[in-house]
Image (tube, rainbow, N blue to C red):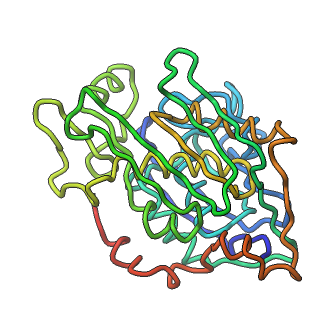
Amino acid sequence: MNQRTVARTIRHTGIGLHSGRPVHLEIHPAAAHSGIRFIRTDLSPHVEIVAHPKSVFDTALATRLGTEKAYVSTIEHLMAALFGLGIDNARVCVDAAEMPIVDGSAVPWLILLDEAGVEELEAARSVRVIKKPLEVVDPSDPTRFIRVEPSKQPRITYSINFRNNALIGSQSLTLSLTGRSFCEALSHARTFCTAEEVDFMRSRGLARGGSLDNAIVVSRTEGLLNSSGLRVPDEFVRHKILDCIGDLALLGTPISGHIIAHKAGHDLHTALAKLLVEESDAVEIRTITAKNSRSSLARLLDFPSSLSEVPDFSSLSLVTG
């Protein structure tokens, strides 16, 4: 199982969630072992930011990479889509401090990546195999945690509990942690917030590009504000898993283990990613070479080469918010 990149350059213009301004983006092919790199083309000179756990410097409202002077925000949805198609290497050129929000899910990114095509590179892919449990707990709220345990099959279990909002409530889901399961079951889940959060963010000059076309908005008094409803009844927890996969994709390798999270968020996701980089005795990095690509581990990773391999994806891509 080899590393991948995009077969040709992708261009897209969309709206930044917080700035409300147009954002121009290009995704270029990249060589093996170069990873995902974000390039701020609006800065002079251009600033290159490596997609890596150590690049994370803020997780308020979204995952932000770089420094206070040069950063790129809301990268998790694109990172999740890149994971879904097993794309390890790409150069993402963007002329703003945040990524376009598109429809609040990863489906538009998957469609763009699929149109560009996936190119196999002459380099083997690596995978992080979990040998010992690792856990991150929120010190201010011990009920919030994320951990990863050894597992014969890559899996993720995620639960949320919004006691103050009956419509969201408590939701839990366990899924295979593979590219194929991401595309099929998670990619369409949109970001969500409450109407009260929208009012607060806008009072601080944020969420200027937010709308019912790119987010699920829930009001305590009026319920779901999106007239088209939810795409699936548990769309809230599915989007949290999408975010988690996008954040953990900063590792640059898939994980063979069982991730378990409760009431987590970008802060805990990225803290676990940093721990997985540092803890060598708990993690074994294995290279899947051509001669053992038929191994059970290679089959379990299961990254589709195109969306034509994903059942019923075309119907998901046509769903609007």
Q: Quadrant of the C terminus?
A: bottom left
**Total number of numbered labels?**
0
At x 33% / y 26%, what residue is drawn?
202
Where 316 falls versus 321 (above or below)? Answer: below
Where 300 falls versus 165 (above or below)? Answer: below
Q: Residue furthest left?
A: 222
Where is residue 7 drawn, in percent x and y? 69, 77
Where is residue 139 drawn, in percent x and y? 58, 17
Where is residue 246 drawn, in percent x and y? 58, 50
At x 76% / y 78%, what residue is drawn?
120
Using the rendered view, name the quadrant where residue 2 is placed: bottom right
Where is residue 245 drawn, in percent x and y? 57, 51
Looking at this view, is 84 or 24 the one in front?
84
Q: Quadrant of the N terminus?
A: bottom right
Looking at this view, is 112 or 223 the one in front?
223
Where 19 falls versus 87 (above or below)? Answer: above
Using the rendered view, name the quadrant where residue 69 is placed: top right
At x 73% / y 55%, what residue is drawn?
36
At x 73% / y 73%, what residue is drawn?
298
**Horizontally, is 148 left or right of 129 in the view?**
left
Looking at this view, is 257 or 169 the one in front?
257
